[in-house]
Image (spheres, helix red, strand yellow):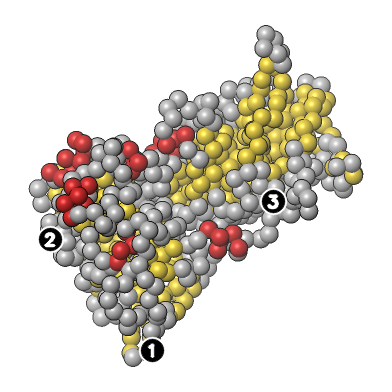
Amino acid sequence: MGEFKVHRVRFFNYVPSGIRCVAYNNQSNRLAVSRTDGTVEIYNLSANYFQEKFFPGHESRATEALCWAKGQRLFSAGLNGEIIEYDLQALDIKYSMDAFGGPIWSMAASPSGSQLLVGCEDGSVKLFQINPDKIQFERNFDRQKSRILSLSWHPSGTHIAAGSIDYISVFDIKSGSAVHKMLVDRQYMGVSKRKCIIWGVAFLSDGTVISVDSAGKVQFWDSATGTLVKTHLVANADVQSIAVSDQEDSFVVGTAEGTVFHFQLVSVTSNSSEKQWVRTKPFQHHTHDVRTVAHSPTALISGGTDTHLVIRPLMEKVEVKNYDAALRKITFPHRRLISCSKKRQLLLFQFSHHLDLWRLGSTVATGKTSGKFLVPGKHGDTLPLSKDADHLLQLKTKGPENIICSCVSPCGSWIAYSTASRFFLRRLNYEHDNLSLHRVSKMPACLRSAVQIMFSEDSTKLFVASNQGSLHILRLLEGSFKHLHTFQAQSGTVESMCLLAVSPDGNWLAASGTSAGVHVYSVKRLKLHCTVPAYNFPVTALAIAPKTNNLVIAHSDQQIFEYSIPDKQYTEWSRAIQKQGFHHHWLQRDTPITHIGFHPKRPAHILLHDAYMFCIIDKSLPLPNDKTLLYNPLPPTNESDVIRRRTAHAFKISKKYKPLLFMDLLDEGTLVAVERPLDDIIAQLPPPIKKKKFGT
């Protein structure tokens, strides 16, 4: 399969933001995740936990609460005092509304999904009616003495529980008055603390209120009498979050020590109908605070300061023991943060508020160097650098908005990027060792924002996907541009096209949204050419092969399709692999393919990668079956060539480079691989709570 020199890049100093809150939607089986920088992500748990949508962060939006309401509507609230509803089609903020209660610490939708409660800094609990177009303020409840940090509805919708500092209040929805106020014991490890913060509450059908607090306690209260029933001391630090299953037979809590505890309702004896809550399972999958938890029908979900989203399946709830029963840790976004200029060997790294442009290093060493890294146990030689990598440019954005997307042109002379409200285009000029940057002004009014950007192979055209479902084509001139055409959204939808692919000859443009399938446009004729047949799982990556103009599409269920754009049908190779089926180990991978490329001299080769493997698919070789070793396809080198050819198959896989954020060919003999080791991320996080270990 050839030999490659590999640029192994580890200077992308990317640190994901910590997870602040999660919200699970049982109807759509989707999970909303908000991070400390204000970013909100949507994961489709039915589509192999793929991150299908995201909303960029904002410096002024410190999200503290997140919830789903009736009709698959998503709301968030935070310390700026605003309630935000998101447009899940256009990937934009639908509207924001000030609650006029100061910073908002908590929020909860009613069991019917028609009302919304928020808990504010000034001690007020505010009730909003959820109308089809917007929410409307209804009334205030009795104001409390301190901020409302947690809220929970009774399943009947008649009462709510509100956690504050030192006490829990139970409100009647009709009157808005507090019917009970339950004081929490300030004792912590035998010492009286100054304050006890109620970080989370859960209201059960039988009237039980479960609370978690800063004293490390999980407590059970009788809301009818306002009395304490039982206490579990589970941690030496704060218990910060709680989530209850829909059946109310189990719940999960997260602590500041990084531990997640599972509680279950079990019978006291084998023949008894009496049940009690028992702490059954502790899980230590986090190194730092677990700020938020969720409980799906088959899994426990947690997230926190260490940036990991952890999905821990409940084995007794999983019907089929396949890859859905495996523990998952999602750390990196399922979207592109790195782009490459092959001609000048540049890498553009995208951060929240700035872009870094690097020139790769070089070596004068020759010979067979590091190309055999795909053979197990042989990783090749390490070549000395004759010239180190250069940090050419840092481009900072103005304002509080995060960068949504960015791209550097193949020739290295253009950089385009976008925030939620503005699109930017920059021209780079290289003179010997000097680099100058020029801003291209007077962008078209239609280019207010972009969700994806891509340059043509010859760097003469720029393709921009807006958040209104339209696609724009710009012709790039010397220091300026010309708007050529706009493809409007199909079938009256406004769904954003999150992925773009341009053919190397510049004649075809493929675009994919989260659910609208893949559309192929003719750039020459400026019209829709065809639509790829719909598939049940979202697209994670797509690319158009040179010469053949075959469109290769990867889906979140690890299926790969090859579609002939000129013939408007799937290729014979694609039909063959769908008929035989992929290897079961290939389908059990839990990270999506995020990039697809092609070898310029070998049209039968498809290059692709996810976070933990790099693969070259050779279409000229037979496909592996389930009896074949997928990750070790080649026999020892001392075997004869006849045996080696007999046992070889189409999938050549390397797991040497991980976590792998980007990998692509620079030329026919050179690869660039960008890694981000998890230890480097953990080293930049604040120190975790120190726990005393036995014998120390």
* Crowd tier of the residue under label 2, counting other residues whose Cα lies within 10 Å: few below 14, some 14–19, many 20 or above: few
Q: Which residue is mark 2?
A: 547
Do callouts 1 and 2 mark residues in contact (Cβ within 8 Å)? no
Front-lying residue, 477 or 136: 477
- Residue 102 marker: 3
Give the CA separation, mark 3 to mark 1.
50 Å
Q: Earlier in the sequence, mark 2 or mark 3?
A: 3
**Pick the front one: 337 or 278:** 278
- Rendered position, 223 above or below 487: above
Rendered location of residue 388, percent (x, y): 42, 81
Left or right of 114? Residue 174 is right
Kind of residue at disc 1 = Asn
Q: Nearer the viewer, mark 2 or mark 3?
A: 2
Dot 2 lies on which element?
Answer: loop
Select label 3 or label 1 by which is in front.
1
Query: Depth check: 124 or 559 in front?
Result: 559
169 shown above or below 310: above
What residue is rendered at 24% in x and 43% in y?
A: 624
Name the residue at 41% across, 65% down. 674
Residue beneath the point at 32% across and 83% down? 364
549 lies above or below 53: below
Q: Is residue 479 left or right of residue 327?
A: left
Q: CA distance from mark 1 to mark 2?
A: 37 Å
**Drawn side of residue 148 relative to residue 650, left or right:** right
Residue farthest toward the bottom in the current orientation of the protein: 432
